Amino acid sequence: MYQIDLNSDMGESFGAYSIGNDDEIIKYVTTANVACGWHGGDPMVMDKVVKKAAERKVAVGAHPGYPDLMGFGRRKMVLKPSEVKNYIKYQVGALMAFTASYGMKLQHVAPHGALGNLCQYDRDVSRAICEAVYEIDPSIRVFYCAGAVLGDEAEKMGLEALSEIFADRAYMDDLSLVPRGMDGAMITDEDEAIRRCVKMIKEGKVTSVSGKELDIKGDTLCVHGDGAKALAFVRRIRDAFEAEGIQINNFMGGRS
């Protein structure tokens, strides 16, 4: 039996700025990665998304990033591991206040944007993130991009590490994501996205941007909520997975 969690990045609107289509996308996913106010999101947005997630039995995870609203957390920053650790604690703690108020437990932490990309190879930063999670609650899971050292560091610390694959992003030969400024970084063709997703889940394989066949492990599948075709992707993915016999569940026992 094939099984996958279907997640999307949500709560990334800020004040008068609206990003993504959370109200519709949340109807199709099993997990929401919720921005914590630094790369996107604010208290009103966080409350709205967590409330909807609770109503639909969608699991909630924290999506902490760099303090970079203008750059949407996608610009590189140079920080000490101790700073990263405290930044993670600060953001996760903020979101946990909202999950607790709706009787929910935080499912996971998934670093966002440039911070998440850094976790592909930087063990010091990865360890700092894991230390923050462990010190908050060692039962919280860690989502890491497939192939990233963050997964190794989480497992060393005794945390449950879950490999995240992407429906709408292309891969380099080392399983890192193709930088957004490069041609082919985003998968925009719905049929191609579906084929890639099914192949990653059923065969554990993905074709890199250079044409190489790579091994890949996927526990959770992400569709970026700010993508132009995010809603179309999650709808098509659900239909395709049902036809392919792939069950969609989160890690809190929820199924939609």
Image: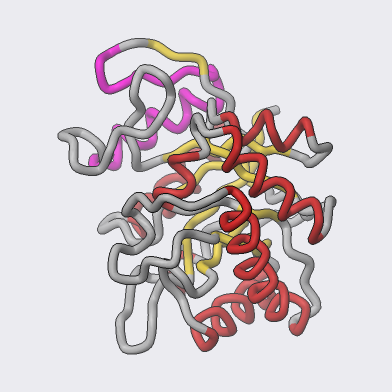
Name which residue lies at 38% across and 59% down. Answer: 73
Image vertical order of residue 182 relative to residue 232, above or below: above
Image vertical order of residue 133 relative to residue 207, above or below: below
Name which residue lies at 32% across and 54% down. Answer: 75
Q: How many marks?
A: 0
Query: Is 87 covered by the magenta stretch?
Result: no
Residue 212 position, x and y percent, is 33, 11
Residue 207 position, x and y percent, is 35, 18
Which residues are the magenta region?
Answer: 187-211
Please state, as top left, top right, bottom left or bottom right, where the C terminus lies in the image. bottom right
Viewer-closest of 20 and 79:
79
Name which residue lies at 18% across and 36% down. Answer: 182
Furthest toward the top, the residue is: 212
Quarter of the rendering containing residue 57: bottom right
Residue 181 position, x and y percent, is 19, 42
Image vertical order of residue 252 relative to residue 14, above or below: above
Please state, as top left, top right, bottom left or bottom right, where the N terminus lies in the image. top right
Image vertical order of residue 180 relative to residue 196, above or below: below
